[in-house]
Amino acid sequence: MISLNYEEEFSEIAKNLKASEIRELLKFTQQPDIISFAGGLPNPKSFPVEKINSIVENLLKKEGASVLQYGSTEGVNSFRDTLSEFVNERYNIKTKRENILITAGSQQALYLLAKIFINPGDHVIVEAPTYIGVLTAFQSYSPKYIAIEMDDNGMDTHLLEEKLKELKKDGIKPKLLYTIPTFQNPAGVTMSLDRRKHLLELAEEFNLLVIEDDPYGELRYSGESLPILKSMDKNGQVIYLGTFSKILAPGLRLAHMIANEEIIHKAVLAKQGIDLCTNTLGQYIARDYIKGGYLIEHLPNIIRLYKGHRDLMLDMMEDEFPENVRWTHPDGGMFLWVTLPPKIDAEMMFKKAIAHKVAYVIGSAFFPNRDHKNTMRLNFTYSTEEQIKEGIKRLAEVIKEEIS
Ligand SMILES: Cc1ncc(COP(=O)(O)O)c(C=O)c1O
């Protein structure tokens, strides 16, 4: 019997895959008596269980075994057609079946985009802070990150312009720009219309590909809705990612990439080596859910539920948090972003929070270079109203102790 040293056998890419410290920290949050604002889960009350049940029953009765068969890598044609009709009308874009790839969540779409676009050392522009999952999806392809600061109006496109000019002087052309313009994860902020226009002007001037990740756009609780970047994209530079995770159910693992046909074709080739096709039954379920008008019918229920949670969390923070703490006031989505006084380190404070039976995600995890130690992300969709009330009280105590 020989015994293999697996560590030696792993590929260079696998050797670089490390469990994030954040995942380690999140383990603490799963203790049953902890009120956790750390996760990013939708509220299970938002899942239309009965409706999905009746759609599945109908599908199996009417279409039988075909809904359980492998499908094409691009996605089920009738679902892509239904989806293109839906997004064209709702987002004022002109997309066809050929521009749509159905993926196993938008997380997979991010991975596919890294696979088809990023060579090690390529420059990728992200927002500061950005979605942790994009850093995970891209990590095997070892890009260099350029993080652009945000304010209440999203990514600061004037800083972006300066940075792009600087890079051009050094002969560097970034490969991709990744943005979550609406109800950003983690910051909760939304890019203003002026900045959306400016960003696209810059994309044109500097010949940039833009990934518009939009899992939360449909979850608006206040304010005016804004056009998606894709609807203002004249040159096919925007790759739009939508998902059913937050408006239907994340367990279906169903999302869509909308892009120029050439990009879709390459992403299909990359996907063939990963999973052949996205879960077929889920695609039929989502098709009939949209076609039957249930998505449009049910969205206001989700919005009502989450608006209540957001308002309650903001009110509680207003009442309980000390004066020198600031936070964002998101018009939608699932998260808000807290900035503590500069001397407070949210990572150091985490243990104290766990001792007080409350949890958050430390903000530095959302920055490629792990700075901004005095920040944290709070989720307001998953906890019950009672948990929000009690959890914010506990968190306020922790912060006050830490400040004093
Ligand atoms: C900004 C962003 N992108 C992508 C995802 C991945 O979503 P899914 O793979 O469930 O579609 C998430 C999930 O939280 C997210 O917040």
Image: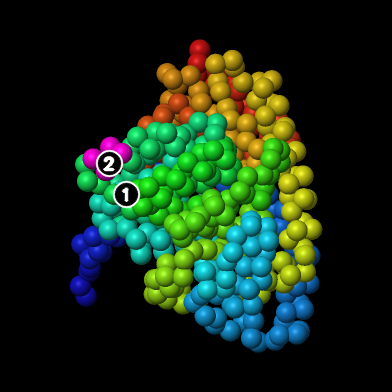
The residue sitting at 73% across, 46% down in the picture is 303
Q: Nearer the viewer, residue 159 or 275?
A: 159
- Against 349, is 173 above or below? below
Q: Which residue is mark 1?
A: 174
Instruction: Residue at 53% x, 58% y: name it.
Output: 241
Residue labelled 2 has its Cβ within 8 Å of some atom of ligand 1: no
Question: Residue 148 is drawn in which quadrant?
Answer: top left
Is disc 2 surrounded by few (<14), some (14 to 19) or many (20+) residues within 10 Å?
Answer: some
* Side (left or right) of 156 relative to 171: right
Q: Is residue 118 visible?
A: yes
Q: How is the image coloured?
A: rainbow
Q: Amino acid at mark 1?
A: Pro
Q: Quadrant of residue 82?
A: bottom right
Which of the labelled discs sits on residue 167, or is there none? 2
* Crowd around label 1: few <14 · some 14–19 · many ≥20 (10 Å): many
Numbered disc 2: secondary structure: helix
Tag 1–tag 2 contact (CB < 8 Å): yes
Residue 349: percent from left, percent from top = 47, 27
Residue 161 is one of the magenta-drawn residues: no
Compared with 373, 296 (above or below) is below
Q: 23 and 320: which one is in front?
A: 320
Q: Earlier in the sequence, mark 1 or mark 2?
A: 2
Which percent across, then down, holds residue 69? Answer: 58, 84
Residue located at (37% from left, 59% from top)? 114
86 displayed left or right of 359: right
Q: Which residues fall within the magenta stretch?
A: 165-169
